[in-house]
Image (cartoon, helix red, strand yellow):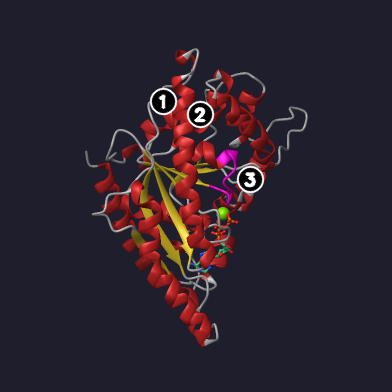
């Protein structure tokens, strides 16, 4: 029997979590892939990752070179087969055909997780989602169906997983809005820089407004039975992960170190101020800090293996050990906060 089939499931329905910061390059994709691997390989959890970033960095990371070619380049040109990606989920809606009934899920052995791979063409459909959002707010069926496309993916998949993770691009555009409205939880990966903390305000403000607009649209819907079952969106904040994107000791001047310390010290208060309505005051939202792991990060990308299991020797042995400690601690804090938030 396959390992996946033997796994014990801890809950009946997956917890759905997106990883978002509208500041780019703060380590979102690296965190999503490596936390999924930690939960799956070391805690026996079933994780589905959805690459909803048109940049497709996550798909490039987790697919082996062979799988990448098989996934994206159809060799059978006569059949003109379409690659099976997140686009296969969105496309039928854009053609007015309703929801896709089969999800294009594939297994990623090295990461121990399943994935729906990304598609650059998703960017083209940002417009569709944006147009339909206007209609959704007014209660239009087509608009609501498009807006709830990721919610529908979750309904189809959630019985089979403990966690469904969404990797997203760094924008507050229509795709990310549809995801933030569909998931139960969000995590904010952040660099210790001023833009990253400004981003917190944007997320909090935007989500509150969208939740209100969607609730209004749903309450005005002419044919409620035509829309997937969606009670209310009540997004919760699991926490933030700080990423040390620079090796501070080598990184030069006292001013940089000082600025870093100052932002770092202020961060808990900033998070509390901007996001307090998304989590209880008894929760510590700082999930952990990921130190700069030097060449382990690019090595893990080249090998398409999570940092905790990169098969390489030399200096990688030390940084792999650090990665294991970091991700082990992160997973425990993650479970702690999820448990607290999920408690009735
Ligand atoms: N802990 C780390 N140590 C060293 N390098 C890292 C670490 N985490 C991420 N990186 C590197 O930083 C770069 C940006 O990371 P990543 O792609 O995960 O960011 P992102 O927030 O997903 O970016 P985008 O906004 O473009 O989606 C990558 O080249 C990655 O290898
Ligand atoms: Mg990314």
For the point 45% across and 35% down, the residue is 211
Residue 156 pos. (x, y %):
44, 28
Disc 2 and disc 1 in contact, CB within 8 angstroms: yes
Decide if residue 305 is in sight here. Answer: no
Residue at point 67%, 43% (across, down): 120
Residue 54, labelled with which disc? Answer: 3
Q: Main secondary structure of the magenta part?
A: loop
For residue 94, above or below residue 127? above
Q: Position of residue 108 (x, y in %)?
A: 50, 46
Residue 302 versus residue 236 in the image, above or below = below
Q: Earlier in the sequence, mark 3 or mark 2?
A: 3
* Residue 263 visible: yes
Spatial CA span between label 2 and label 1 = 8 Å
Q: Which residue is mark 2?
A: 148
Residue carrying label 1: 230
Q: Earlier in the sequence, mark 2 or mark 1?
A: 2
Question: Which numbered mark, 3 or 2, is in the foreground of this view?
Answer: 2
* Helix, strand or loop at mark 3: loop
Question: In the rendered structure, does residue 172 fall within the stretch colored magenta?
Answer: yes
Image: 298 above or below 141: below
The image position of residue 282, as x and y in percent, is: 23, 54
Going from the N terminus, do you reach mark 1 or mark 3 first?
Answer: 3
Specify the segment rendered in magenta: 168-175
């Amino acid at each position: 029997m396959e390992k996946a089939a033997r796994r014990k499931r801890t809950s009946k329905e997956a917890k759905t979590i997106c990883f978002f910061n509208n500041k780019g390059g703060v380590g979102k994709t690296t965190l999503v892939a490596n936390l999924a691997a930690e939960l799956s390989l070391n805690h026996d959890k079933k994780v589905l990752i959805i690459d909803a970033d048109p940049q497709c960095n996550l798909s490039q990371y987790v697919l082996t070179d062979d799988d990448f070619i098989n996934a994206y380049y159809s060799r059978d040109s006569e059949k003109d087969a379409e690659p099976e990606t997140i686009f296969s989920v969105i496309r039928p809606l854009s053609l007015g055909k309703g929801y896709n009934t089969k999800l294009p899920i594939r297994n990623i052995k090295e990461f121990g997780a399943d994935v729906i791979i990304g598609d650059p063409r998703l960017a083209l459909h940002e417009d569709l989602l944006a147009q339909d959002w206007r209609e959704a707010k007014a209660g239009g069926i087509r608009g609501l169906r498009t807006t709830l496309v990721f919610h529908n993916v979750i309904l189809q998949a959630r019985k089979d997983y403990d966690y469904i993770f969404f990797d997203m691009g760094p924008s507050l555009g229509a795709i990310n809005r549809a995801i933030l409205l569909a998931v139960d939880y969000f995590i904010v990966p952040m660099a210790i820089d001023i833009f990253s903390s400004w981003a917190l305000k944007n997320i909090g403000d935007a989500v509150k407004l969208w939740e209100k607009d969607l609730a209004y649209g749903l309450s005005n819907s002419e044919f409620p039975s035509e829309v997937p079952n969606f009670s209310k969106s009540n997004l919760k904040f699991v926490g933030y992960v700080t990423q040390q994107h620079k090796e501070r000791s080598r990184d030069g001047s006292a001013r940089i170190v000082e600025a870093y310390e100052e932002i770092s010290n202020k961060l808990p208060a900033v998070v509390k101020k901007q996001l307090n309505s998304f989590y209880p005051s008894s929760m510590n939202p700082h999930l952990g800090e990921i130190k700069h792991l030097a060449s382990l990060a690019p090595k893990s990308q080249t090998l398409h293996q999570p940092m905790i299991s990169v098969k390489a020797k030399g200096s990688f042995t030390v940084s792999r050990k650090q990665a294991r400690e970091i991700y082990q601690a992160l997973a425990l804090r993650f479970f702690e906060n999820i448990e607290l938030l999920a408690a009735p």
